[in-house]
Amino acid sequence: MKFGYYLLKKRYMKKNFLSAVCLMITLHGVTVMAERTSKPLAPTPPMGWNSFDAYRGDIHEQACLDNLKTFVEVFKPLGYEYFVIDGGWYREYKLRPGTLFPVAGDEKIRDVNLDQYGYFTPSKCFFPNGFKPIADECHKHGVKFGLWIIRGIPRKAVKQNLPIKGTPYFARDIADTNSVCSWSQDNYGVDMTKPGSQEYYDGFIQQLADYGVDFIKADDIVEFPAEIEAVVKAVEKTGRPITLSLSPGGRVLADAIGTYEKADMLRVTGDVWDKQFDIDKCFASWLKWQHVPVHKGFWFDMDMIPFGELQVTVSKDTPDDKAGYEGKHRFDRFTVPQKETFITMRAMSASPLFMGGLLPTLDKESLRLLTNKEMIACNQNGKMGHMVEYRDYIQTWLTEQRGAEKDSGWAGVFNRSGDKKTADVSLRSLGLDPNKKYNLYDIWGEKPFKTGQVELEPNGCLFIRYEIQ
């Protein structure tokens, strides 16, 4: 059975789940909105860069500054504003001679850096000057500086039984040693029923605020609402406007929507990489969440955009079975039609746009798509589109423009198969009123569009801007 038809069929099987989600939002909506400011920190989907796709957990201070330079020159003028260092920033490695990367094959972390209260501090091998040079350079150019964190308290702090700042308690008093992330062994979970647990989070988040952090990506946390609440409270206590992103998205809990909405972003997919399977994964998520009402300033996140040069710290000669699930050093494996589909889907679903590839070496096609002003306008419109038609593996989606819902917006016609397809595109098939006249524009073709038969490349798309005459 082809994937597109399977998703459409499954859509109706998820009816009860979506009803539960909508009910929980209704029940929690008044409370959540009362707790958030009238002006959300992220009134439109956040846009930026995250280091993981390019560097995994091995980014060096100099690499940060090199990418930041391109970010400021190319992306900041278009509205991209967050520059985020992902996981591993507190780990110590032996670096390869003449490089800024760990010794090849040295997969064992030599140590993690902590202060006297068990808070992670910057790696000495990767960030010899701490985060100040990077945060200062970001802020000088109006860029917001972000860091990744992982739920819980470091195992090293528990082993040493370090004190919880400002309390008579210690790390072993609050650690839940039965709660461990399946893909990172750095931390134990925190038992939020224990005294001293909130104070631990308060101190750690305050330290990040002191570093100049404007964005926190909290990982391994979506399934743990109590620890989300702790991070939210800690952020509020800092008095600093910090955008909060929740990850990963493998298992989103329907009855925790009220808690999730206290953050600004919620991952609703697993990790996304540069294969057709990953594009399919995002379409499945879009189909699932398209009609779930949430307040403005809270965004469903489909993970990063793996365009360009990826995984530069992993040698191209590394055997596939040793490269890890992220793969070895490469340029992304997408075709141009796949890339157009990927970024059109992100724009029309109002997913945050976080570029993941190396910025200084970004290829021409990736740059063309990521900097397209019409794509950015669609995304920043901040309205998740919905499917209007499915026929012969062709999905048509519509995203209406806020404030002009009946008159203007964007349409996407997606070939969800690996074969070339011919689509009959009409006003009716696009979800538009056939009795009205519209100006239609083919965004990727950069020309006016006339309805009729259209050839779609395998896994490709047609991205249309429409406006009533």
Image: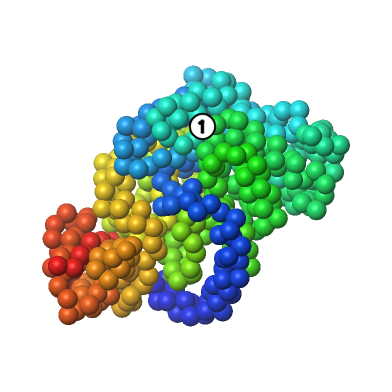
Can you say which quadrant of the picture contains the N terminus? bottom left
Residue at x 58%, y 58% (from the top left corner): 34
Residue 122 drawn above or below residue 293: above
Residue 331 rendering spot, x and y as whole percentages: 37, 42
Q: Is residue 113 left or right of residue 98?
A: right
Answer left or right for 216 relative to 427: right
Q: Quadrant of the C terminus?
A: bottom left
Q: Is residue 362 above or below residue 226?
A: above
The amino acid at mark 1 is: Ile
Is residue 362 visible in this depiction of the protein?
no
Density class for disc 1 (Cα within 10 Å; few <14, some 14-19, many ≥20) is many
Residue 437 in view in this figure: yes
Viewer-side residue, 399 vs 199: 199
Nearer the observer, 166 or 357 = 166
- Return the residue nearer the eye: 345 or 105: 345
Judge left or right: residue 415 versus residue 15: left
Residue at image location 19% in from the left, 60% down from the top: 442
Residue 218 percent coordinates (x, y): 59, 47
Observer-nearest residue: 105 or 440? 440
Identify the residue at horizontal 17%, vertical 54% (top origin). Answer: 446
x 63%, y 68%: residue? 255
Name the residue beneath numbered marker 1.
59
Quick one: SS at disc 1? Answer: loop
Percent from the top left, x then y, of residue 259? 62, 59
